[in-house]
Amino acid sequence: MLEELRITGLGVIDDTTLRLTAGMNVITGETGAGKTMVVTGLGLLFGGRADAGRVRADPGRAVVEGRLRLGGKLSDEVATRVSDAGGEVDDDGSVLLSRTVTIEGRSRAHVGGRSMPVSMLSDLGERVLAVHGQSDQLRLLRPAEQRGALDRFAGPEHEKLLESYREAYGRWRAVVDDLTDRRRNARARSQEADLLKLGLDEISRVDPQPGEDDDLRNEVQRLEHAEGLRVAAALAAQALAGGVEVTEESPDATQLLGTARRTLEAQAPVDPMLGELAGRIEEAATLVGDVSAELSAYLGSLDADPARLEQIYERRAELRALTRKYADDVEGVIVWAEEARTKLAALDSSDELLDELDKERQRLEAQVTELSARLTEARTEAAGRFSEAVSVELAGLAMPHARVEVAVVPRTAAKDEPAMGPDGADEVELRLLAHPGAPSLPLQKGASGGELSRVMLAIEVVFAGAGGPETLVFDEVDAGVGGTAAVEIGKRLARLARTHQVLVVTHLPQVAAFADRHLVVAKDTGGAITTSGVRIVEETERARELSRMLAGLPDSDLGIAHAEELLAVAGREKRA
């Protein structure tokens, strides 16, 4: 559950902390006091869109911090997700979350003491928190959202079936699109293939090898400067190993090293250090001998063959012709050829390949059709259960004669489009029968504002029983409701709070009376700038707040008496 929420610099809230509890937490306050900022802060903390316009000019940034206490069926899953991302779970089993938004619109997120992408907060939010408000009601009126809601209610086995369908559908659509494209653009594909073949033929004739241009460049330099290289190598070899011009007066390097070694060896008995130096001179003489031998071999390999030089010039000209057309260097030409071969295979529009693709299309289409039929059957079964469960809840929400129907109907496809879509061949629509004999109408047409709020709450109660996040936030879902229906909403929320942490922003005292913890958002207009804070109210203070909500008279004896009676009724209902 969300154990603590601190909001700083957001809207009218300067700095306040909400200490939440398990069960039902109710947030009340005057209109404009900042109740909405609490829900906005929750949205930010769990990855919602940052609105720089809500950031207070002083201090120029908004910070929302939360302590998430792990527990329940999602505890291990959330802890693993945080740890894998590099965050830390505290020893007491809680995770610290933070979101900062500056007045310039920059945003930062922290999870478990580590800086994270905002998407990490969104990921955690989807697992642990569900926010339901007026905008969520509008969202659930869309057919796609209603289908998704029914799929979630249907259970994990249905979701596995839906995932299998989506995978098969994706493969089928890919083959259909590929086949259509090959048939429709056969001429353009053939022309492009011909151009690729010409290029591949030209490259194949030249047959460039990796690194060949560098090797040829080096060989050209040796051939063009063969005489200079020969003279330098010959003089170096002569100086190292002797030759016709070396005399007693001008000894070679080998002779000089030999003289130095023998001189030192003669004195080695007197001083062993000279013997060690003599050994090192012998090593140097061996190295000089090796270099001399390599120079002799190098002289033997030098070739000033003009014919070979001409061959290299021609070969380099062929390679340059390729690099002018296809790439900057030989390696690039080789890569172009590999990519062209791959693309050429993809451009194949031969009758043989088209026949193979058509057979694959038919096979996948049969598989998708079979899975689609199973999806329809599963949705129809879930629709009956869902309709019955929601209708039972409506009876307890002062709508005893109302019934919600879930219609699973064939998907309406555009002309020349298949009946099956990414989510199956079904459209799902929630319909309301307000009373016996009334027509079955879509929710947005058949329900008033107060009825719609109660229908949505009934749906959420049913969803909660089918799993989902363990913290539920309701932002004035009781709008347009009063009297007995308001009391029944309070009862349902209290019942939800037995298995979930529930946060309710409400203006109804009948709902607030059922709270396990009552928080009040209050304005402070005493300073130069209006600010709001949140405090917990209990006992007498709570009765005064309910009195204010009932009649706008927090100090009225009659209002307080009425509030105390309401609290007593709620207490009995919760204990029942």
Image: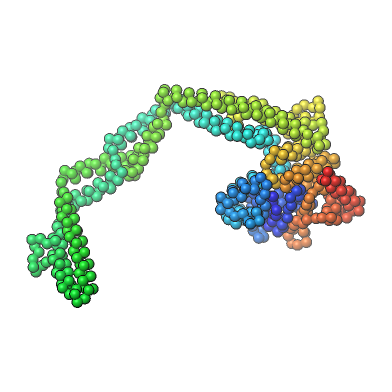
Side (left or right) of 166 relative to 271: right
Q: x and y percent of residue 335 in the render?
A: 36, 40
The residue at the far bottom in this view is 270
In the image, is residue 52 above or below residue 247? above
Q: x and y percent of residue 569 in the render?
A: 86, 46
Residue 236 is drawn in which quadrant? bottom left
In the image, is residue 5 above or below residue 400? below
The residue at the far right in this view is 558
Q: Residue at x 79, y 27 (%)?
A: 438
- Please say which color scheme the image uses: rainbow
Near-viewer residue (113 or 199): 113
Q: Residue at x 76, y 48 (%)?
A: 24
In the image, is residue 413 above or below residue 319? above
Residue 285 is drawn in which quadrant? bottom left
Q: x and y percent of residue 264 in the render?
A: 18, 72
The residue at the far front in this view is 269
Can the viewer see residue 446?
A: no
Q: Residue at x 66, y 58 (%)?
A: 57
Q: x and y percent of residue 288 in the render?
A: 19, 61
Near-viewer residue (572 or 207): 572
Can the viewer see residue 322?
A: yes
Quadrant into which the C terminus falls: top right
Q: Residue at x 61, y 50 (%)?
A: 79
Side (left or right) of 474 relative to 240: right
Side (left or right) of 85 relative to 300: right
Near-viewer residue (102 or 242): 242
Side (left or right) of 102 relative to 552: left
